[in-house]
Amino acid sequence: MIDSFIKMKIVNGVLTPSTKFDQRKYDLFIKAIPPKEDLEVYITYTEGKLGTLAQLAKVHAMIHEISDFTKQDFFLVKNSIKEACGLYNISSTTPYTKTLKSFGDCSIEELGTAIAKCDEILGIIYATN
């Protein structure tokens, strides 16, 4: 199985990779697939309601605080928060695999959930719940 996550936009009614980087990932993906093979495609429309920069800054600051207090690697804590909040896409069902979402691709509500989870953890750490 070959997986790839590519951001796309609609240009003149055609799905087109959003950036040169996404175009390169798309090209490499297509070259790796034999001709006439069926593909399983999952498409999501974010409705332009991505989280705010303030939310991104807050969730990262909170993760740093948790990471510093627990002496755990920042990326381990960040991925654990994403997992606990369900911020992932199912990449495949056979075998079952999932890809964690980037916070930059999360909606306002998803980032709010991550902030609430961090707040819950920090409340336990500082016994203020």
Image (tube, rainbow, N blue to C red):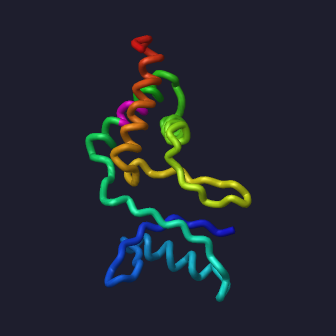
The percent position of residue 2, horizontal first and vertical second, equals: 64, 69
Farthest residue, direction bottom: 35
State the residue at coordinates (51%, 35%): 77
- In the image, taking residue 127 as reference, residue 34 lies left or right, namely right
Quarter that holds the C terminus: top left
> What residue sits 50% from the left and 36% below the top?
81
Q: Nearer the viewer, residue 43 or 71?
A: 43
Q: Is residue 15 above or below residue 50?
A: below
Residue interval drawn in magenta: 59-63
Q: Is residue 32 depicted above or below 87 in this figure?
A: below
The image position of residue 119, as x and y in percent, is 40, 26
Q: Residue 39, located in which quarter of the rendered image?
A: bottom right
Question: Closer to the camera, 115 or 44?
Answer: 44
In the image, residue 70 sits, relative to residue 64, either above or below, namely above
Q: How many marks?
A: 0
- Magenta segment's dominant SS is helix
Please determine whether, in this image, residue 30 is positioned above or below residue 125: below
Residue 8: image location, x then y, percent: 41, 71
In the rendered view of the protein, which quadrant contains the N terminus? bottom right
Q: Measuring 54% from the left and 55% from the top, which residue is drawn there? A: 89
Q: Quadrant of residue 33?
A: bottom right
Closer-to-camera residue (13/21): 13
Q: In this image, 72 relative to 103: left or right?
A: right
